[in-house]
Image (cartoon, rainbow, N blue to C red):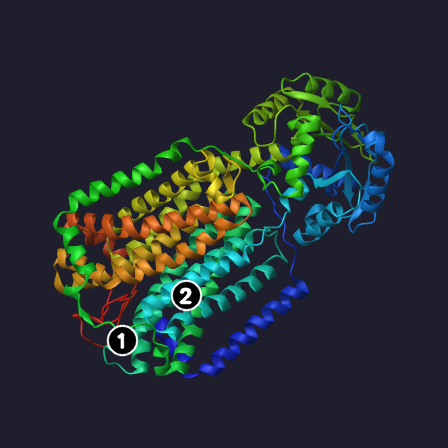
């Protein structure tokens, strides 16, 4: 791998302008194709083969009108009055709503009987002129603004419903900019020069731009989640900066050690560049494994993240060498602060700390495990759900509509169950539909059932059952189970709660296979690189501890509400099941990044000296600062999503930031060295028979010798000693 990476990078460096032009043309071509043939972004939460999925397939096939999206225009009369007293105002408002784009019809709440008992709150059903998934977030944002800006006199008008909530906007570009600014400050401290600090930021932005084009193009042939770009972009910014950081740090180190620019670049790309390819490939494989869940929204986010990481890796081994070749000595321009003297390894705090951990591994091991288990403990009480409009920020129109509907009709109106009867299959016939509706109405937890509607071809019947509880309430799931127990085989239940229940059931069934696949692939890759059994076992266990810590924090903050107000939440918020699943492969892959960069240096020193204690100390001295800096950058970028108005994105940002912080401090700097010190030479044991049959993978190799007793840059990603990591 190292030879291929070096060859590709140096070819780019020899023809820098050609490489840059190729990138410009490639990005332009991707965006042109995406603009011409790119698809729209939709969230497919259905669980294939489930009741809710079957119900929606029948509706989409046989009820064209019902298949179109719907929203609710909610009215509230001023205190002391009723809507009936301003019936003209309601009618005028609905006339204006009917003129808005994508509005096909609106019902009259007085004729439909959708007025609350006290007469103050009512709603009109708004039917879109296209299916919900064809509109997209921008169109829904325009529709919401159009409805809420209607002059209705003293009447209050809000737009709600599941379609509006699920397609609500929540841009975070400004918050991401703050994260990048923090990353820039960290890079300035690491490199000490402005040019070297700006380079990783610029490279990551180019890579993310190319990745966005690729994701948009992917949407032309498969359903891609509306959150795919947000999630993938978040990961892409983090890894893009980190990968460039590792390469630039090694390149500047080699220059300081006395190599000319070309030799320094070749060495950096053969060592750190190869590690970047391996680390990025691991993240891409881990996120792509989301297709195992069989859930469309997760599959698309997994593939989108893999595309973004792939773009970052390609940029790091092609565009970055070209830019470094053009910059030459100017990489050190724009010096910030005073220059620090070069220190030998034995003078660094990381070297001393490494020896301290190696000398007394048990206290560090037990203390680290105790801290991690304490942080992860709340995860044992995790209750996953799917967010509802009632969890949205109070200032949003769909949250206002949710609260008004709850006040006027009860919380269950926000969680309607769609009951679909397939008259083409054995079971209940047309004459028995009323009996089925009566049976459902008698189920505990159901407050009312609407009149059945039959499709034009008389093959399908649809009606609505309203529960007494809300969409995120576990009691609603219990009610759905009761309903499904009393219906015949050709009757199916859908609705947002039924869909998410079926989704969670499928995820629970697929989760063991998914987690097992991610761990197995990571285990195999680490075993190939480090020719060890203990290293991949330790990596898997420690990665799980980091992820468990992140889950524990999510439970404490969101489910229990500890500090929720500080994050802009009104109180406890359900933990989104999809976010929990998405976090696992991303964190597992990113944790592997730091594992590779740390252990490759430790293995290098062990191969050179045969001294396990010294190799651990020198490994920390060589990678401690750069791994910590890379983690700080990741934390800064991920934390920017905490300021998003969308609770699910807050969860993702906080969970990723906490896990990376735990992984780069407690795990990599204390737990890994302590376990390696205790295991000694057993760290690198591999059965002879297995060693013979496994292919040999060279991750890092630097054929040019340079001094090894000097820590030559603030980052010190790797030593200047020849990095030859060949399987034994």
Q: Is residue 726 left or right of residue 422?
A: left
Residue in view at x 64 percent, y 42 percent: 165
Q: Return the residue at label 2.
A: 184
Provide residue 721's location: percent of width, then percent of height: 20, 71
Which residue is outermost to the front? Answer: 80
- Dot 2 or dot 1: first in sequence order is 2
Is the N terminus in the top left, top right, bottom left or bottom right quadrant? Answer: bottom left
Q: Is residue 563 visible?
A: yes
Q: Quadrant of residue 49?
A: top right
CA gap, disc 2 and disc 1: 23 Å
Q: Is residue 1 visible?
A: no
Q: Quadrant of residue 430?
A: top right
Provide residue 564's location: percent of width, then percent of height: 47, 39
Q: Return the residue at label 1.
A: 254
Query: In the displayed structure, would residue 704 be above or below residue 455?
Result: below
Provide residue 372's location: percent of width, then percent of height: 30, 41
Tally of numbered discs: 2
Q: Residues within 10 Å of mark 1 (few under 14, many from 20)?
A: many
Provide residue 451's location: percent of width, then percent of height: 79, 25
Is the C terminus in the top left, top right, bottom left or bottom right quadrant? Answer: bottom left
Query: In the displayed structure, would residue 110 be above or below residue 134?
Result: above
């Amino acid at each position: 791998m190292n030879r291929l990476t070096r060859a590709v990078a140096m070819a780019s460096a020899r023809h820098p302008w050609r490489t840059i032009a190729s990138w410009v043309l490639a990005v332009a071509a991707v965006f042109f194709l995406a603009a011409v043939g790119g698809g729209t972004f939709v969230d497919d939460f259905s669980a294939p083969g489930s009741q809710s999925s079957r119900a929606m397939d029948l509706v989409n096939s046989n009820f064209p009108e019902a298949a179109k999206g719907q929203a609710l225009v909610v009215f509230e009369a001023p205190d002391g009055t009723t809507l009936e007293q301003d019936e003209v105002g309601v009618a005028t408002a609905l006339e204006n709503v009917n003129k808005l784009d994508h509005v096909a019809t609106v019902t009259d709440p007085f004729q439909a009987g959708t007025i609350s008992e006290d007469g103050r709150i009512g709603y009109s059903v708004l039917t879109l002129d296209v299916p919900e998934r064809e509109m997209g977030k921008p169109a829904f944002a325009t529709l919401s603004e159009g409805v809420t800006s209607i002059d209705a006199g003293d009447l209050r008008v809000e737009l709600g419903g599941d379609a509006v909530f699920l397609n609500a906007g929540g841009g975070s570009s400004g918050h991401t900019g703050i994260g990048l600014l923090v990353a820039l400050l960290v890079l300035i401290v690491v490199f000490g020069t402005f040019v070297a600090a700006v380079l990783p930021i610029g490279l990551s932005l180019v890579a993310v731009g190319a990745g966005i084009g690729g994701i948009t193009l992917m949407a032309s042939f498969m359903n891609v989640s509306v959150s795919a770009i947000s999630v993938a972009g978040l990961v892409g910014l983090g890894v893009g900066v980190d990968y460039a950081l590792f390469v630039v740090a090694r390149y500047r180190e080699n220059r300081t050690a006395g190599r000319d620019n070309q030799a320094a670049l070749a060495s950096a790309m053969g060592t750190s560049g190869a590690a970047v390819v391996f680390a990025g490939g691991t993240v891409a494989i881990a996120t792509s494994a989301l297709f195992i869940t069989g859930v469309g929204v997760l599959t698309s986010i997994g593939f989108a993240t893999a595309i973004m990481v792939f773009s970052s890796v390609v940029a790091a081994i092609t565009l970055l060498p070209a830019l470094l070749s053009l910059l030459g000595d100017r990489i050190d321009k724009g010096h910030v602060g005073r220059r620090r003297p070069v220190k030998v390894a034995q003078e660094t705090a990381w070297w001393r700390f490494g020896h301290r951990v190696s000398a007394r591994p048990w206290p560090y091991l037990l203390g680290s495990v105790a801290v991690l288990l304490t942080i992860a403990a709340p995860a044992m009480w995790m209750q996953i759900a799917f967010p509802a409009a009632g969890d949205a920020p109070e200032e949003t129109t769909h949250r206002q509509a949710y609260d008004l509907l709850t006040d006027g009709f009860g919380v269950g109106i926000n969680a309607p169950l769609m009951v679909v009867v397939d008259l083409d299959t054995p079971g209940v016939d047309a004459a028995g539909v009323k009996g089925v509706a009566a049976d459902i109405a008698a189920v505990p937890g159901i407050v009312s059932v609407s009149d059945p509607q039959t499709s034009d071809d008389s093959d399908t019947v649809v009606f609505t059952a309203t529960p007494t509880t809300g969409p995120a309430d576990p009691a609603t799931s219990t009610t759905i189970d009761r309903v499904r127990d009393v219906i015949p085989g050709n009757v199916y239940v859908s609705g947002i709660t039924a869909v998410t229940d079926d989704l969670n059931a499928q995820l629970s069934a697929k989760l063991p296979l998914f987690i097992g696949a991610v761990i197995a692939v990571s285990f195999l890759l680490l075993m190939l690189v480090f020719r060890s059994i203990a290293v991949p076992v330790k990596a898997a266990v420690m990665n799980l501890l980091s992820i468990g810590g992140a889950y524990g924090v999510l439970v404490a903050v969101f489910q229990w509400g500890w500090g929720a107000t500080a994050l802009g939440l009104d109180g406890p918020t359900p933990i989104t099941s999809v976010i929990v699943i998405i976090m696992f492969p991303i964190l597992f892959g990113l944790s592997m990044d730091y594992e590779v960069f740390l252990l490759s240096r430790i293995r290098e020193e062990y191969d050179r000296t045969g001294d396990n204690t010294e190799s651990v100390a020198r490994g920390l001295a060589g990678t401690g600062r750069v791994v910590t800096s890379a983690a700080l950058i990741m934390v800064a970028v991920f934390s920017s999503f905490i300021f998003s108005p969308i609770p699910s994105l807050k969860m993702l940002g906080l969970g990723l930031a906490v896990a990376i912080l735990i992984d780069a401090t407690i795990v990599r700097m204390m737990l890994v060295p302590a376990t390696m010190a205790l295991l000694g030479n057993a760290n690198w044991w591999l059965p002879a028979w297995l060693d013979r049959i496994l292919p040999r993978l060279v991750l890092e190799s630097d054929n040019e010798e340079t001094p090894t007793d000097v820590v030559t840059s603030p980052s010190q990603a790797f030593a200047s000693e020849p990095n030859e990591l060949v399987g034994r």
